[in-house]
Amino acid sequence: MDATGSHLLGSSAAGFTCNRADVPEVQIAMANEALIQRARASAGGQQKATYSSVDELAKELGICRVIAYAALKRGDIPSIRIGKRYIIPRTAIAEWLKSAGKSLNNAQ
């Protein structure tokens, strides 16, 4: 941002440059698209309704399993808890990722 608070996308001022990939909303959209493509490729185009494990979810999100378990326990990642097991619907994760970009837009 410059002194007036506006973003300098694609411009340069005082040595500062910013491209579209530096904007958080764009990063989230790119990560979501990559996640969807990896899921389709690994399932051969036929996706399971849920993640088979927290490890699988963590791998697709690019986080470690300890962080994934902590976020699930806090309720940050949408899931269904049955006993000690987490059921993680793929549709809930997709909606959660989409809403993350919207909350960034509203915060600005």
Image: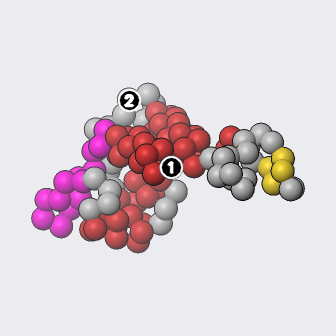
x, y percent for residue 49: 28, 38
- Confirm whether residue 42 shows in the render: no
Segment tinted magenta in the rendering: 79-92
Could you tell me the amino acid type at mark 2?
Gln
Say what secondary structure mark 1 lies in: loop
Looking at the image, residue 67 sits to the left or right of residue 90; the answer is right
Q: Position of residue 32 (x, y in %)?
A: 50, 41
Q: Is residue 102 left or right of residue 31?
A: left
Residue found at the very far top of the displayed protein? 45
Mark found first going from the N terminus, 1 or 2: 2
The figure's colour scheme reads secondary structure
Q: Please tell me whether residue 99 belongs to the stretch shown in magenta.
A: no
Give the residue type that dot 1 points to: Gln
Left or right, 97 with respect to 26, comes to left
On the image, numbered disc 2 is attached to which residue? 46
Residue identified by numbered label 1:
108
**Which of the pair 23/56 is nearer the observer?**
23
**Residue 24 vertical placement versus 91 (above, below):** below
What SS does tag 2 mark?
loop
Q: In front here: 86 or 46?
A: 86
Residue visible at 72% across and 42% down in the picture: 9
Number of on-image labels = 2
- Report the residue at 87% width, 56% height from top: 15
Q: Position of residue 30 (x, y in %)?
A: 57, 40
Q: Quote the CA–CA distance across marks 1 and 2.
A: 37 Å
The residue positioned 46% from the left and 33% from the top of the image is 40
Q: Is residue 34 positioned above or below 16 on the image? A: above
